Structure formats: structure tokens, C-alpha cells
Image (cartoon, rainbow, N blue to C red):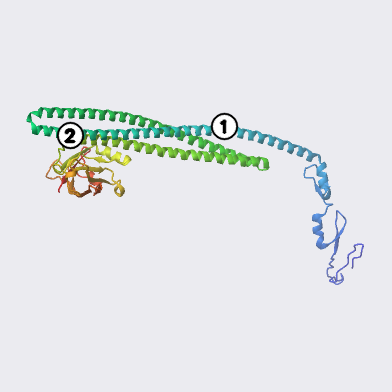
Amino acid sequence: MAMNGNGYSRISNGSSSASNGSTTVLKYEKSSCLFCNEWFDSQTFTEHLIHCGQVLEQCPNNCNAFVPRIRMRSHLKECPKAKAQLQQHTNSLERLDQFMDNRVTQLEKDLSALRSVLNEEIGQRLHLITDVGNLRKYNQVLEDWKHDVDENTNGMKALLNEEIVQRQFEVGEAYKDNVANFEMIKKVKADIQSEMDVLQKNIQQLSMEVADHVNHLNDNTMKLEEMILENEKKTLDKFIQIEEFLNVIDSDLKTKFVANSDLNAKQVNMDLEVKGMKNIVCETEERCEKLEEMVKQVDTSLHQTMQTLADLENHLATQQRLATIQNSRGHLVWRIKDYSKKLEEAKQYETILHSAMFSNKPYGYALRLDIHPNGKGTWKGRNMIACLNVIAGEYDALLPWPCRLQAEIIIRDQYTSTEEAQDYVKTILVRKKNDEFIQNNQFFHIPHKVIMSRNYLRNDCIFLEVRVLK
């Protein structure tokens, strides 16, 4: 059966009659849409149902109305529930905008407060830097004053030596002429001794003044270190609070400013300001570290200045006895007391210990033993380093140069029984050229483990012995 224009269907070629007992199969080539009453092929019918504009759909606003699909947009514009939801949505957006404006205002106030706090912190840092600069100036003035004292002392020593030589020459000439002038020689010696006593008093007074200045400088340094530590703690606490607050602000901004471009732009500006504040805090921390290094350098220079002053006093005391050195047999026994304290000072300030002056023979070379308690160079931290120095003496013009000496350095074993004692002995060479002031020091090292063994260190004291062989 064929389908005509009115939509009747026809039987396909594969059908059979009912009398033969077989089933008749009907196959429709076209179907009509139930909504728009249009005819479509079986292949396009399903696709048409998906896009048909006459299909009835329920209103998404739940107003219980079924509207053709093609009229859904116009219905949504006129739907009463849609208008109510639109008004509610508009009100919520206005409230969100108002909340965001209030939040931004509050954040701007907080940022201004943070800026004021950082400005105060920067002001304090500037005051600290100014104090450190003043401390440097004061230390420079102290160094200049020390240099002037050294020059004056050297001048006084030179004048005193000239006066002693001249008066000795005058006394010698007078002694040849008349033995009765012996009383005059005694008076001259008494005058020289009184002048040396006055010079010693002046040196002691200068040393006391220098010690007072050094103590005052140490007090200022300690106060400055305490202020720096307090400011660092405050800065660290403020930085932690600022970082936590900025993290909270960041999380709030990320959740609130997703759909608003203007607020996102403000958030970007605020992030830039936050990064700028973090950079300021990092710079402040770097300045604190630099101030700490400066304080350490000032402390080291102060200790070196004190050590130099102590050496200067010892040098002045030995210069007074330089013309008449008692120890002129090439033999020295040096007792170093408070060894533990001096070792700790050497670890912290790299101090050097100097022995008393002695001579290898009467009217011979002036010698001195120098010790680095904590070592030097590659031997630092594990050994004690020592060397024998040839220093300027009164009789250098009469002695043969270059100087070449051999000596034994002995660490005495403080054992109760002298028969069982085992001393630690080292042999070194000393060379010096007088014309070039060049000295080739031969250093020798003694491990700290050796010093702590046996009885070399007893009652926190060490005995060092020097014997010049030739």
C-alpha cells in the first residue's frame, strides 16, 4: 500500500498475505508532529522534537504556567515571580556593594595605621643609625687622642733618652776631672729618677682616663645592643601580625571580589601596597643585621684598643728599664696565669700575649716571646702558636747583622716529683735583618690537647721557659 499526499501509508514489498499464516509488517515513511502538526521523515522526526518551538515547557520560576518554548523569553519578562526575584537579587547586590565599600574603607584605614607604624619604626631605625654614627665618631676621637698620646709619649721618651745620654756624658767628663763630683752625679740621678716618676704618674693618669672613656663607651655599646634587640623583637612581632592580617585580608578579598572588576582592581593595588610593606620590613631586617655587625666590629675594636693600651703601658715600663736589662743571660721563665680566661679572650678577640723583654747576653739583642693562645691561620682553634721576636734595643748599632739565633721553648711539667716530670721542648730559629727591618719568624705550635695533658696546666697557670742556645 503506497502513501499519497494525504498521508496514507503503503505496505512494503516484503509483506505476505494473512492466509499463508505469516505476519504483515507496516513501515511508515513519514510522521506528523503532535505540537506543530508538520510532517517529517522518520530520520529527522526525533531531531525536530528537540528543537520544536511549540513544545510546552514549565516556567522555571515555578509560577505553575506551561508556555510554548518559542514564547518562554517573553513570558519570563512578564512573569510576576521573576520580577520579585530580580528585585531581590538587585537588593542583595546593592547590599553586597555597600558591604564591600565599608570593607574597603576599613581596609584603607588599617593600611594607613600600618603605614604610620612602619614610619615610626623607620624613625627609630634612623635614630639608631645616628647613634651608631655618633659612636663611630667618638671612637675615632678616642683613636686620635690615643695617637696623640703615643706621639707625646714617644717625644718625651726621646727627650728623656737624650737628656740621660747628655747628663751621663757630662757626669763622665766631670768624673775624670775630679772624683769629688760624685755627689753631683747622685743629684743628677735623683733628678732623672724624679722626672721618670713624674712621667710614670702622668702615664698612669692617662691610662685611668682612657679606661674611664673605654668603660663609658662599653656602657653605651651595651645600651645600644639592648635597644637593637628590643627593636628587633618588636619589629618581628609587628611583621608577624601584619603578615597574619594581610593573609586574612587576602582570603576575604579573594572570596568577596570575584564578580566585581572594580573591586578586583582595588585588590591588585592593595596587593602591591602589601608587597611594598613587606619589602620595607625586609629592608629593615637587613639594616638590623648590618647594625649588629657594626656593634660587633665596635666591640672588637674596643677590646683591641684596651689590649694596645695595656701593651703600651708594659712597653713604657720596659723602656724605662731598657738601658739596664737585668735578664741578660739568654734565659727567661714566664708564668702565664688565668690561662682559661686569656684563651676565651683570644677566641673572641684574637689577642696576643707578650712576655717581658730579655737579652741573649750582656749588651746583646733585645728579645721577646709572643704567644697566640688560640692559634693563627690554619692552626687556629686547635693549637697555641708562639714565636721569638728580635725587637729594637739600645745596643743594636754595636751588634752584628743580620741576626741569627737558635733557642729552645720549654713548657714546664708542674709535677710534684721533679724526677718524673716530662717537659715539652721545641727548638726554633730567629732571623732578622736590621737594615730592612725584616724578620723571618719561625712559629711553632703546641696542640691544646698537649697543654691539657699531664701537669703542664695547673691551678690555671702555665710556665714557659726560653733558653737561647747561640
Does any portion of residue 411 appear in the rendered image? no
Q: Residue at x 79, y 55 (%)?
A: 50
Classed neighbour count for the residue bearing mark 1: other residues with Cα under 10 Å, few (<14), some (14–19), many (≥20) = few
Q: Position of residue 168 (x, y in %)?
A: 15, 34
Front residue of 400/112: it is 400
Q: Residue furthest left?
A: 179
Front residue of 270/420: it is 270
Q: Position of residue 174 (x, y in %)?
A: 11, 32
Classed neighbour count for the residue bearing mark 2: other residues with Cα under 10 Å, few (<14), some (14–19), many (≥20) = few
Q: Is residue 415 above or below residue 38?
A: above
- The amino acid beneath tag 2 is Gln
Q: Residue at x 81, y 61 (%)?
A: 44
Q: Picture quarter containing residue 46?
A: bottom right
Disc with the residue nearer the chain's start (2 vs 1): 1
Q: Residue at x 23, y 44 (%)?
A: 451
Q: Nearer the viewer, mark 2 or mark 1?
A: 2
Residue underneath mark 2 = 166
- The amino acid beneath tag 1 is Ala
Image position of 340 (left or right of 118):
left
Q: Quadrant of the N terminus?
A: bottom right
Q: Is residue 347 above or below residue 56?
A: above
Tally of marks: 2
Residue underneath mark 1 = 113
Q: Position of residue 91 (x, y in %)?
A: 73, 36
